[in-house]
Image (spheres, grey):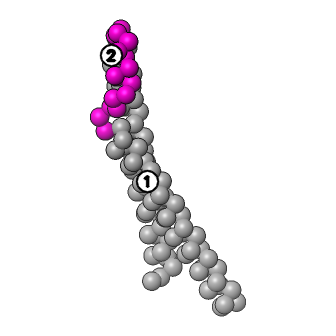
Amino acid sequence: MEIQSAFNAGVQGFQQATEEANKAATDIARNTLSDNEANVEPTSNSAATTSAVNEPNGLTESIVNLRVAEVQAQASAEVIQSADENLGTLIDVRV
């Protein structure tokens, strides 16, 4: 594998992770806003307790997607770092 292709793979993975993190963050914000707007109406104490326990649709999935994007970004950063270290080693050997 060429070092340039390793750099490219790392950068592409990092860009994809950034896009996924942005999408998940948008979904989380949308779900949170929708949930807060739904809780604005006055309710009895028992209903308020129930709505606090219930989770908005898709919030858990969005949080998991955000965490997956974080791990993907970390892995991609390690690929870039490894390619950089290998390039440094090759330059040191050739000099």
x%, y% of residue 73?
48, 58
Above/below status of 88 relative to 41: below
x%, y% of residue 38?
33, 19
Q: Which residue is mark 2?
A: 47
Which residue is pictured at 42% across the width and 40% down the height?
25
For the N terminus, which image quadrant? Answer: bottom left
Q: Which residue is mark 1?
A: 69
User: How far apart are labels 1 and 2 at the CA level?
Assistant: 35 Å
x%, y% of residue 11?
48, 64
Query: How many numbered discs sit on the rendered protein?
Result: 2
Q: In the image, which residues are magenta?
A: 41-58
Residue type at numbered disc 2: Ala
For the C terminus, which image quadrant? Answer: bottom right
Which residue is pictured at 56% across the width and 74% down the height?
82
Residue type at numbered disc 1: Ala
Which residue is pictured at 41% across the width and 43% down the height?
63
Above/below status of 48 relative to 68: above
In what element is the residue under mark 2? helix
Q: How dense is the environment of label 1, judged by Cα within 10 Å: few (below 14), some, or many (20 and up)?
A: many
Left/right of residue 84 with respect to residue 41 in the rendered view = right
Above/below status of 8 relative to 21: below
Residue 59: within the magenta?
A: no
x%, y% of residue 92?
68, 86
Labels 1, 2: front one: 2
Q: How dense is the environment of label 2, judged by Cα within 10 Å: few (below 14), some, or many (20 and up)?
A: few
Is residue 15 visible in the rendered image? The answer is no
Q: Residue furthest left?
A: 57
Q: Are marks 1 and 2 in contact (CB under 8 Å)?
A: no
